[in-house]
Amino acid sequence: MPEPIGDIEIVAPNFKRQLSGVTSTIVQLIPLQRRLGLRIATLGPGLPAGLPKISWLSLLRLWGRPKRRDVRLWHARRNNEMIAGVLMRDALRIPLRLVFTSAAQRNHKPFTKWLIRHMDAVIATSARSGSYLEMPHTVIMHGVDIGRFHPAETAEDEFAATGLPGRYAIGCFGRVRHQKGTDLFVDAMIALLPDYPDWTAIIAGRTTAEHKAFEDELKVRIAAAGLQDRILFLGEVPDIKIWYRRLSLYVAPSRNEGFGLTPLEAMASRTAVIASDAGAYAEMIEPGTGTVVPAGDGAALREAIRPYLADPMLAATHGDNALVHVRKNFPLEKEAGAIGAVYERVFRKSSRAVGQ
């Protein structure tokens, strides 16, 4: 059932049907924000049935103010959501204030810069993404749900339960494509696994039709090396969380990235991480939890992996450290609280709460 619009003070739109990192962020954050007392709902297609949301018809009632505030907040994360917010606030005179979260790590196009300048508050998901913004902003890095992503607890969580060869697993998860660096991971495994027979490589994630030839070519290279039983493509798995728990080492070799949550998910599962310096990876990994290498540098990636394969106890130690680091610095509650503080500053600046 759609939420009564009079009760909603913050709308977090999702104007994209396909699952994306932005959609995943919205899906994870909103239930937690509600538990923290925020009157927030989302709007848009392709969202889970149980997520608090408003209907499209509710947009016609945004001229009416919420029960406890003089204005509502519209939290955009994409350009089209910013456009909708600016039109509603400035053209239709709807009592809205606009918040935008930017994850992009590139120079923005002129129109995007114009939109961002018309926001009432801007959040950057990393210091690097913030460096491309030409206006004041708050850096709030994404967090991870440490209740959902956690270390192994049962025998089923152990790699031995898979029945796959070897004693230890190294994994690379996410969409299979050149941008994600799947080929860099495969090349490193082809070079290293013959020297480390206790290790098996796991690749999990969706391959779209557009990238099927890319995956097929990787499988040809693996077969030519005689490693088809030790470098495995699982495709999309029903529950990726258990596979993080089964790994001893996780690799995130992206050539470019917006933010990139997978290293945090791995570290929350007590798994050491090697990542490129794409996205926010370098800002989430610290010495003793893993290693960061230049994006696109296959040789550097290979040599960063080698010490962990040679010494599984190093991977275990760094995994322990990673778990402590993530639980301290990247719980989802910390992200939700920081966003809530931004909301409250905008409310205080632009309107007075009523009935308090």
Image (cartoon, grey):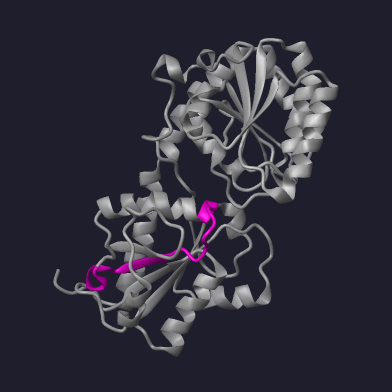
* Image label count: 0
- Residue 254 sits above or below residue 17 on the image: above
In the rendered view of the protein, which quadrant contains the N terminus?
bottom left
**Most extreme residue toward the front, as rendered?**
209
Residue beneath the point at 64% across and 12% down: 165
Give x and y (percent) for residue 92.
41, 88
- On whether residue 13 falls in the magenta region, the answer is yes
Give x and y (percent) for residue 194.
78, 14
**Most extreme residue toward the left, as rendered?**
355
- On whether residue 128 falls in the magenta region, the answer is no
- Residue 155 sits above or below residue 204 on the image: above
Query: Quadrant of residue 147 in the image?
Result: top left
Give left or right: position of 48 versus 303: left
Give left or right: position of 64 versus 297: left
Residue beneath the point at 67% across and 48% down: 208
Give x and y (percent) for residue 283.
58, 43
| Front residue of 80 and 222 | 222
Residue beneath the point at 53% across and 53% down: 19
Give x and y (percent) for residue 163.
56, 14
In the rendered view of the protein, which quadrant contains the C terminus?
bottom left
Query: Quadrant of residue 230 in the image?
Result: top right
- Residue 146 sits above or below residue 70 on the image: above
| Magenta highlight range | 4-22
Residue beneath the point at 31% across and 62% down: 40
